[in-house]
Image (cartoon, rainbow, N blue to C red):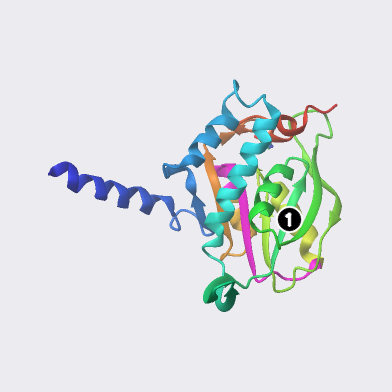
Amino acid sequence: MILNLIKPLNFVIKNVFLFKPHLYKMIVHNLEKAHSILNQFITEIRDVNIQKDSLRFRRNIERIGEILSYELSKTLYYGTKNIKTPLGTKDVNTFNDKLVLCSILRAGLPLHQGLLNYFDKAENAFISAYRHHPDNGDNFEVIVNYLAAPSLQNKTLILADPMLATGKTLENTLRALKDYGSPKQIHLVSIIGSEEGVHYVEKIFPKNTHLWIAAIDEKLNSRGYIIPGLGDAGDLSFGTKL
Ligand code: URA
């Protein structure tokens, strides 16, 4: 009897804490706490014994992108339209938003593919950014040197960065996109973030920005990598670089 009362209460408590508008000014959807198949994919990309299989790693990132797309799709603007089936007609709900998916090369490619698998009619933007360590030490600056984007004016911009570490890459990306028009809504999509990175981007992005994220980890190391994180998402997807 008591167990029957505790179960639904547990569910309510868990779901209230999924959504933390009191901690972040942005609307943060941290999907980590909900028990779902997402946890399995996150576990596999973190686990040193599994993540080295790069085909599996990329596909897991893609699958996480698909789940985040599905969750994000619940906040788009829907309208009713009447369609014809072979046997009749039906009023259906479809979203009206004009989506632009923007990803950062190269680590962002599998996540971009996951988003595109679901938002298949979206326009696309790509930007390249890399960390330049001027003195070969821990300090780095983020350099943006390639950008191809459609107009963003009045569109819904979905900006994907698999590892939201310091937040500097997203900041530089937002700055680089400013000449492409003003989106009416921005959604950030990340797989793993750091507390510090989430707080940093909330200061930079408009208040109504949504962040869809599969896990938020505690800290960064001195080189700006997320701890415990998963390592280097670009290298795990595409191999090490010089
Ligand atoms: N980029 C990565 O690939 N991993 C991190 O932990 C941080 C940035």
Numbered marks: total: 1
Q: Quadrant of residue 6?
A: top left
Image quarter where ligand 1 lies? top right
Residue 222 percent across, percent down from the top left: 66, 30
As drawn, 137 above or below 31? above
Circle 1: element type: strand
Quadrant (top left/top right/bottom left/bottom right) for the C terminus: top right
Q: Residue furthest left?
A: 1
Tell me the residue at 59%/71% (across/down): 86
Residue 170 as seen in the image, left or right of residue 141: left
**Front residue of 234 and 166:** 234
As drawn, 137 above or below 209? above
Tell me the residue at 51%/41% (across/down): 38
The answer to whether the beta carbon of the residue marked 1 is less than 8 Å from any atom of ligand 1 is no
Q: Residue furthest front?
A: 87
As drawn, 30 above or below 209? above
Which residues, given as a range, are shown in magenta? Answer: 180-198
As drawn, 92 above or below 216? below
Residue 213 percent across, percent down from the top left: 55, 48
Tell me the residue at 52%/59% (across/down): 25
**Front residue of 169 and 230:** 230
Q: Which residue is mark 1?
A: 102
Tell me the residue at 46%/53% (across/down): 23
Task: Indicate the amino acid at tag 1.
Answer: Cys
Inspect the magenta stretch and tell me whether residue 197 lies in it. yes
**Front residue of 202 and 33:** 33
Residue 212 as seen in the image, left or right of residue 33: right
Inspect the magenta stretch and tell me whether residue 191 lies in it. yes
